[in-house]
Amino acid sequence: MPEDTFSEDNTVAGYWVSHATVEPLEMVTIDDLVASHAVADIPLRTEDNLWPFWDHVVASTLEYSGTRLRYAQPRPVCGGAPMRHAHIVPP
């Protein structure tokens, strides 16, 4: 994206936003995301249950956004109420 119309919005997790319509400079297709991470030596980890990790994020001092949590599996239920994890040790 062209940089000149973007500015950092620190109100939510430091997103970079543009209030003007922009055209992408190029489109890059990534056929195998996992292999691309491996080639770049970027660790990639999956979680069977995202909620313990999310509880840790919310309890931290990190700025965060949970916008895509709507795509996560529902929070596990224990005794009729959603399970919450009081103490999570980061990996």
Image (cartoon, grey):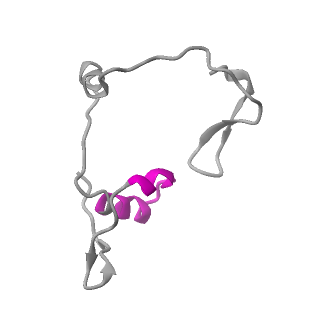
Residue 70 highlighted magenta (yes or no): yes
Horizontally, residue 31 falls left or right of residue 66, namely left
Q: Residue at x 26, y 58 (%)?
A: 49
Q: Residue at x 56, y 48 (%)?
A: 13
Residue closest to the far bottom:
79
At which x and y percent is residue 17? 67, 37
- The vertical placement of 15 against 66, above or below, is above
Examine the rendered structure and indicate whether residue 84 appears above or below residue 8. Answer: below
How many callouts does the rendering have? Answer: 0
Residue 61 as seen in the image, left or right of residue 7: left
- Closer to us: 34 or 63: 34
Q: Is residue 28 left or right of residue 3?
A: left
Placement of 19 over or under 23, stated as above or below: below
Q: Main secondary structure of the magenta part?
A: helix
Q: Is residue 17 above or below residue 76?
A: above
Hey, which residue is sitting farthest top in the picture? 26
**Residue 72: x %, y % from top left:** 36, 55
Q: Please identify the quarter of the rendering in which residue 58 is found.
A: bottom left
Any magenta on residue 68?
yes
Q: Which residues are magenta?
A: 52-71
* Camera-nearest residue between 84 and 59: 84
Residue 55 on image: x %, y %: 36, 64
Give how far across and how far down residue 42 sits, in percent. Answer: 29, 28
User: Could you tell me which quadrant the N terminus lies in?
Assistant: top right
Residue 26 quadrant:
top right
Which quarter of the figure has residue 38?
A: top left
Q: Nearer the viewer, residue 91 or 80?
A: 80
Residue at 26% of width from left, 24% of height from top?
41
